[in-house]
Image: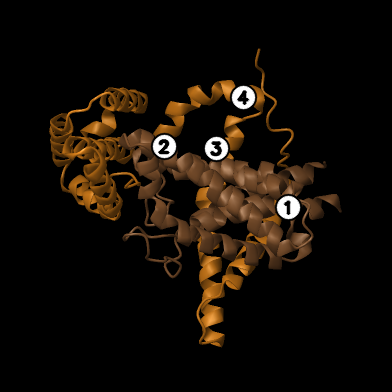
Amino acid sequence: MSAHYQTRDFVRICLFAAFIAALGLLPKFDIPIAAGVPVTAQTLGVMLAGIVLGPRNAVLAVLLFVFIVALGMPLLAGGRGGLGVFFGPTGGFLLGWIPGAWIAGLTMQKLPLANMFAKTLTAAIVGGIIIVYAAGIPWLAFVAGLKLQSAAYAVLAFVPGDILKAVIAASIASALPRDQMPDRSHAG
Amino acid sequence: MIGGHLYPRTWLHAVPAGFKLLALLAAATFFLAQSDWWMFALAIAAVLCAYALLGRQALKRLTHLRPLFPLLAIIYLLQWYLEGHNQAAVSAGRLLLMILLADLVTMTTTVQEMLDAITPVLRPLERIGLDSRRLALAIALVIRFVPVLFDLWTRRREAWQARTARRISPMLIKIFVIDTFRMADHVAEALDARGFDARSVPPRKRN
């Protein structure tokens, strides 16, 4: 890999972290369901990161984003940020974004599906929902002293919004021009 | 949860960030083991007093916690139904207390102080390729490009709205992704042109 591609990967990681942050600023995209908790487009950004950046760059982009949030920058939707987020009920979901982006990227790489929409949708659901909830529910159970099952019930209301976001992520990613998919552009 | 740093500086700003982080960790460990609701009520009252001592600005930040309450209420009701009042109050109280405490640390510590405090903790990661100078550049790039990208999005949205009466389509986000990649390519070229070599940054003497 030439030096230029390394620089490009580095900058793509940084700018995609900024992209996820920018999605948190979009007011129009707040879908006010789930008991007043604003469902935001940021999970969409995490799903897209996994799909379009490839597993390694995606995990680094999301890790960078979560790290900057932990440092205290209010980059989460609604201007939230700081350490309190991680002690809150949804902290595990935020942490789950990190392996979620990686798994979404791996799914994109390994899944032998010709249909682009089916492939990206699977990646978004596996990485952006299953993995994220697999981290978020035990975390909530832990910080709140809940039983796993109770924690699962408490976040049930978020699932429809996340499925909608996976569909949107898949429709976006499968419509991207081929040369924007990083694995192909590197091969050139 | 609140995010953002409190200004002007207060007495709690003077406490070293590393100390505040350790205290937070100790509090988290301690309160994880508590199971009496009144402990949490007392602790929350004490933390609220600390907010009051920091001044009106700090108290005003408490209103930012409002979006949290529906989920706290769900957890409380669920626990009340399944485990009874004490357990419900402990669950909701622990969450609220730890969020308040952690926000207290974030509010009184700048991003730079926080980064400086955890850099020693990150040092072992240098062995697997983490470079603290590259990390600092990455953080600066992200913070710089959030408003730039948001501005790009706003212009795309305005162009869309000027041309159609329809709702914003997800395809606008597709264009936003392409914009982001295009901008990343420009920035990468600019960095290369200024002699930035992603491979050559890491080398630094270590044993």
From the image, tell me which residue sits under label 1.
Answer: B189
Q: Are marks 4 and 3 on the same chain?
A: yes
From the image, tell me which residue sits under label 2.
Answer: A139
Q: How is the image coloured?
A: by chain
Mark 1–mark 4 Cα distance, whole angstroms, equals: 26 Å
Mark 2–mark 1 Cα distance, whole angstroms, equals: 41 Å
The hue of chain A in the figure is brown
Tag 3 secondary structure = helix
Where is residue B128, by image quadrant? top right
Mark 3–mark 1 Cα distance, whole angstroms, equals: 19 Å
Q: Nearer the viewer, mark 4 or mark 3?
A: 4
From the image, tell me which residue sits under label 3.
Answer: B136
Q: Are marks 3 and 2 on the same chain?
A: no
From the image, tell me which residue sits under label 4.
Answer: B126
Tag 4 secondary structure = helix
Q: Looking at the image, which residue is at 50% across and 41% down?
A: A134
Local crowd size for mark 4, using a 10 Å CA cut-off: few (<14), some (14–19), many (≥20): few
Q: Nearer the viewer, mark 4 or mark 2?
A: 2
Specify the chain shown as orange.
Answer: B
Where is residue A90, by image quadrant? top left
Q: Nearer the viewer, mark 1 or mark 4?
A: 4
